[in-house]
Every structure is written in structure tokens, then in C-alpha cells.
Amino acid sequence: MHKISIKNDNDIKGMRIAGKLSAEVLDYIAPFIKPGVTTEEINEICHNYMVNIQNTIPAPLNYCPQKGGIPFPKSICTSVNDVVCHGIPGNKILKKGDILNIDITVIKNGYYGDTSRMFYVGEPSLVAKRLSDISFECMWIGIVKIKPGIHLGDIGYAIQKHAEKYGYSVVREFCGHGIGKNFHEEPRVMNYGIPGTLEKLKTGMIFTVEPMINEGRKEIKEMSDGWTIKTKDRSLSAQWEHTVLVTKNGFEVLTISPNMPYPSKCIINT
Ligand code: MF3
Ligand code: CO
Ligand code: CO
């Protein structure tokens, strides 16, 4: 098992600021999500807001975790319909009924804030809305488990159980991650698992919870651009993401903003 860093008070202050700023980008972009807009236009609006208004750095731009890999060419990820994650903004025109995940990661004073939400283009179909809603519940069901002493496997188990109850599947190849002065740190926060397994949580850990839930089968395929991940069966996929701090008694969501969606009481009490 690898070492998971424990953040000090100074780090936590920095992470609160970065988290809030990343969530505020999602608040800002929401009214622009309409039929006819391209994902490249969404990228530009977010990029300009981050760089000129917030004075943050868009972490995805030129991000290249693997040596010799293709650097991510844009400032945000836009993952439409059957795109699971890491969709590259481009000339794709959004149309009524599309669903998309927008994933924002900003750097402020060296700290990373990472959050994503689902958006509807016009009115969603019932099946699309249900997938997005259940994926949102999956994220929150994972988050509310968080407190010192629980295991990472407890989070994964809770998420997987909820998704599979509705006949959905959990993507295995991608997961949540520790975050701080680096985009991706230990631990890996899997969205499936067995209760009581993997690392025990300690006060001061910070990581993301970001389940990717498919309407159909769990298998994925990578596109030739080196980044875009789609469902293998071309079914819809949805994802939500928060950055979360483990506190003495539970958790604190760091990626909060005035317009962030909240879960219903019955979900947070499960
Ligand atoms: N924001 C994504 C995450 O939640 C990572 C995106 S990497 C990128 O971990 F290069 F595609 F932006
Ligand atoms: Co993340
Ligand atoms: Co993200």
C-alpha cells in the first residue's frame, strides 16, 4: 500500500479555495449549455473565466501523465452521451436531448480543485435523466460514508451496490484519486469493491469521489485521439465528481458553490 498524504491546516485552506473556484466555473458555464453551442465554445468560455476572472490555471491544458503520451489539448473535459470521460472539446455541436459531463480542474496557489457535473441540452429523455440522477446519488452515497476509520472498499461497495440495483454498471478503469498540490495522488478511490478492504481513512486525507456509471455494460474503449473514452456498447454514461476532505467526525465537501446541486435527505441517510 502506498502512502496517502495528510494535509495540514494550510493545505486545507488552500484546497477549500481551489475547490470553490472549480465549482464556480460549473455555475458560470451552466446558462451557456444550449442546443447549437459547440464543446469548443464551452471550453473557451470556461478557459477565459478561469484565466482572466479567477486567475486560476486550467489543470487539464497540456496535462500529460504518461511519458511520451499525448498532452490533453484543452482546458476542460466535455464528455457527451456515450463518452465516459476525458472528452476533448471540439467542433461537436450540442443538440436537444444530449447529456454531457463537464469536468473542471483549476490550480490556485499550487492547489488543485477538481469537480464535475452532468448537464442537459434542452429537455433530457427519461432514461438519460434517470441515469444522471442515479449517478449523482452514487457519488453522494459514497461521500456520506466518509469518516476516519472506514475503508476505501466501503465507499466502492456502496457506490457499486446502488448503481447495480438499477441495472447500471460501474466503469472499472477510472476512479477517484487523492489530490492536493498534485492533480492525481494516492489513493485510488474505486467505485466498486468489498466492505472492510483497502486503506483506512484518516483525518486530513483529501480525495475525489467520481463514479462513472454506464447505462449498459461496463466495458469501455479508447478513441484514437489518445484521450476520449467511450462505452464499448455505445450506451449512455454519466459521472459526477466532488473533492472531499476527511474530517474528525466525517467529511467536508470542498468543491462547493452557490448553485451546486444537493442530494435529497433520503439519499444522505442511507
Ligand atoms: N478531471 C479529471 C479527473 O477527475 C482528469 C482529467 S485529465 C485530462 O481526474 F487531462 F483529461 F484533463
Ligand atoms: Co478527478
Ligand atoms: Co475531474
Image (cartoon, grey):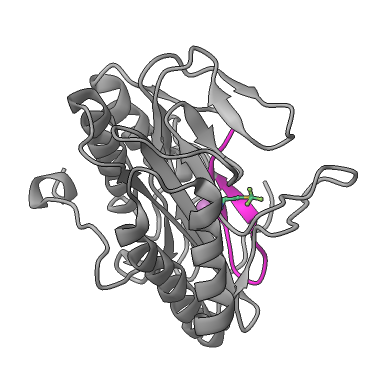
Look at the image and tell me whether residue 59 can be seen.
Answer: yes
Relative to 213, is 88 above or below? Answer: below
The segment highlighted magenta reads 173-188
In what quadrant of the picture does the C terminus appear?
Answer: top left
- Quadrant in the rendering for residue 112: bottom right
Look at the image and tell me whether residue 195 can be seen.
Answer: no
Nearer to the camera, 50 or 195: 50
Side of 74 where 30 appears, left or right: left
Residue 86 at x, y percent in the picture: 59, 42
Residue situated furthest bottom in the rendering: 10
Give me the residue at 12% from left, 50% from top: 264
Residue 241 at x, y percent in the picture: 42, 51
Nearer to the camera, 95 or 261: 95
68 in the magenta segment: no
184 in the magenta segment: yes
Residue 187 at x, y percent in the picture: 59, 51
